[in-house]
Image (tube, rainbow, N blue to C red):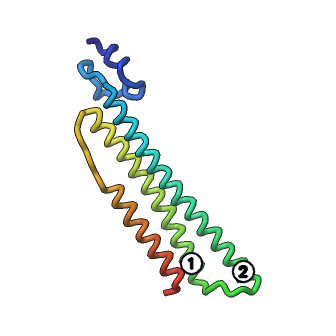
Amino acid sequence: MTKKEAVSSCSAEEAGDPVLTATRRCNKDDLRTHMANERTFLSWCRTSISLVVFGFVLGRFEILLQMGKENGFNTGNTHTMTDLRLVALFCFLLAGVLILISGWRFLYVRKKIMRGEMSISIFPELMVIISMIVIIAMVIVLMVGI
């Protein structure tokens, strides 16, 4: 089999990969695995976008509290607004870190797939779980006013 035949049997994305050799043909399982890797990356991107949106919602809520305070409503102390800014900032930073890690993970898993190695890591999932617990705790503390 020539290198051209091996490349033509794989996706266009894989054709430029130096790991692909003339003796290895991509089968349907390889393509499914690559597509699953891409879907996983896109889901992490959606999670990052959700965190950014949550940060913006908290920012808008802060503006609503300020407007209420200006109109004479009791909206809590000034620490509440500072705390909202901190939670929103944490969401923005977490979204940036999450997108970087998900991009690195996508490329890492892609390389492992091309080499035929199995790699399972729960680090990204643990990071999201711990981050969500921290965000929820921050919001609860903010709401209770501790």
Q: Could you say which disc has been placed on residue 82 in the image? A: 1
Number of numbered callouts drawn: 2
Residue 74 sits above or below residue 114 on the image: below
The residue carrying pointer 2 sits among few (fewer than 14), some (14 to 19) or many (20 or more) residues within 10 Å by Cα, namely few
CB atoms of marks 1 and 2 within 8 Å:
no
Q: Please name the amino acid that badge 2 sits on.
A: Gly
8 relative to 49, above or below: above
| Placement of 44 over or under 87, stated as above or below | above
Residue 74, label in figure = none
Identify the residue shown where x is 31% and y is 18%.
6
Residue 102, horizontal then vertical, whole percent = 40, 49
- Whole-percent x and y of residue 55? 56, 64
Residue designated by label 2: 68
Amino acid residing under circle 1: Thr
> Disc 1 vs disc 2: which is toward the camera?
2
Q: Residue 97 in the image: x percent, y percent?
A: 43, 57
Q: Quadrant of residue 58?
A: bottom right
Q: Residue at x 51, y 71 (%)?
A: 87
Q: Is residue 114 left or right of residue 46?
A: left
* Disc 1, SS: helix
Q: Quadrant of the N terminus?
A: top left
Q: Residue furthest right?
A: 71
At mark 2, the secondary structure is helix
In the current view of this chain or complex, which residue is farthest to the top? 2
> Does label 1 or label 2 sit earlier along the sequence?
2
Mark 1–mark 2 Cα distance, whole angstroms, equals 16 Å
Across and down, in percent, residue 72 comes to 75, 86
Residue 119: name its quadrant: top left
Residue drawn at x 48%, y 67% is: 90
